Image (cartoon, rainbow, N blue to C red):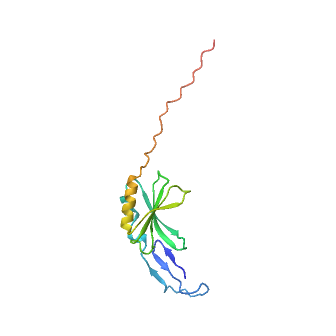
Amino acid sequence: MFEIALAAASTVVKPICSLGDSSESLDGVEERTTLRDVITPSEIAHQFEGGWDVQFEITQGRSGSLNQVATITHNQLPTEYRLEPTDTFDPNGEVAVTRRQSPSSGRDVLNTAETLGDAITLLSQRLRATTVPSPVEQPQTAEPATPTTAPSI
């Protein structure tokens, strides 16, 4: 038996027939609560001051299960943070806070919080302590001098 988690509908499909069976019954469909059901990007981004963006993603865990995570990024930093519930269908329970320093690096577990609220608080404190570079101003250049030619003698 396998499960498919749908982010938008927060629904788990559990087939009740074998793959070769032509039955199309939806008796095995049930709704489950996921991370996206308990927080919204605007709510969480408001807590992460300083231009951090929050998106939800479906990722595949080591066991092959699908997990819904919140990915937190900043357009001026290569670092990416994630809130990853230990149990996809218990988003208010234990949550790992992970970080990836650059697109080519692996993820580090920074902390595991007992609740989603604790994880958001921990990450919020870390993000406030993160220095975001200010936009670099382009140096002003003087207009190039108009070439002058010396009068010929």
Quarter of the image holding residue 43? Answer: bottom left
- Front in this rendered view, residue 63 or 44: 63
Quarter of the image holding residue 106? Answer: bottom right
Q: Quadrant of the C terminus?
A: top right
Q: Residue furthest right?
A: 153
Q: Position of residue 97 (x, y in %)?
A: 44, 63
Instruction: Answer with left or right where residue 13 lies relative to residue 122.
Output: right
Quarter of the image holding residue 126? Answer: bottom left
Q: How many marks?
A: 0
- Compared to residue 15, the image places residue 146 above or below, namely above
Q: Quadrant of the N terminus?
A: bottom right
- Front in this rendered view, residue 104 or 32: 104
- Compared to residue 150, the image places residue 63 above or below, namely below
Q: Position of residue 33 (x, y in %)?
A: 42, 75
- Front in this rendered view, residue 19 or 131: 131
Q: Position of residue 135 (x, y in %)?
A: 44, 45
Residue at the (54%, 71%) spot, across then down: 62
Residue at the (50%, 55%) spot, across then down: 101
Residue at the (43%, 73%) spot, across then down: 34
Q: Position of residue 19 (x, y in %)?
A: 60, 84
Residue at the (44%, 47%) spot, across then down: 133
Q: Residue furthest top?
A: 153
Instruction: Answer with left or right where residue 60 lies relative to residue 132.
Output: right
